[in-house]
Amino acid sequence: MAYRDGQNLAEQGQGKAALDKYDEASRLDKGNAQYRMSALLSLESLTNVAIYEGEKARSLGQYEEAQ
């Protein structure tokens, strides 16, 4: 099951792969709000990590990495 696979991947710290599985689960069961919410929360988490890493690199003067 895609949703369960997403949960397992998220627990293993594989955020992008988890997001892909949550998206798959959401596409397969369009009426399931939990699947969509998990996909959105996963996307938000990945976005926050990217912002944090970019800001950290920028503050260290690592402008190429900040992009």
Image (tube, rainbow, N blue to C red):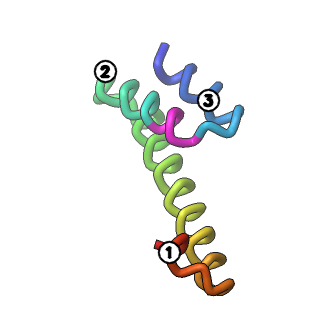
Q: Earlier in the sequence, mark 1 or mark 3?
A: 3
Tell me if mark 1 has few (under 14), some (14-19) or many (20+) residues whose alpha carbon lies within 10 angstroms of its own: few
Q: Which residue is mark 1?
A: 64
Name the amino acid type tagged 3: Leu
Q: How far is mark 2 from mark 3, CA to CA? A: 18 Å
Residue closest to the eye, 44 or 37: 44
Q: Which residue is mark 2?
A: 28
Q: Earlier in the sequence, mark 2 or mark 3?
A: 3
The reply to whether discs 1 and 3 touch (Cβ–Cβ < 8 Å) is no
Query: What secondary structure is the magenta-colored segment mainly?
Result: helix
Q: Residue at x 49, y 13 (%)?
A: 1
Q: Which residue is mark 3?
A: 9
Tell me if mark 2 has few (under 14), some (14-19) or many (20+) residues whose alpha carbon lies within 10 angstroms of its own: few
The disc placed on residue 11 is none
Residue closest to the eye, 51 or 63: 63
Magenta segment: 15-19
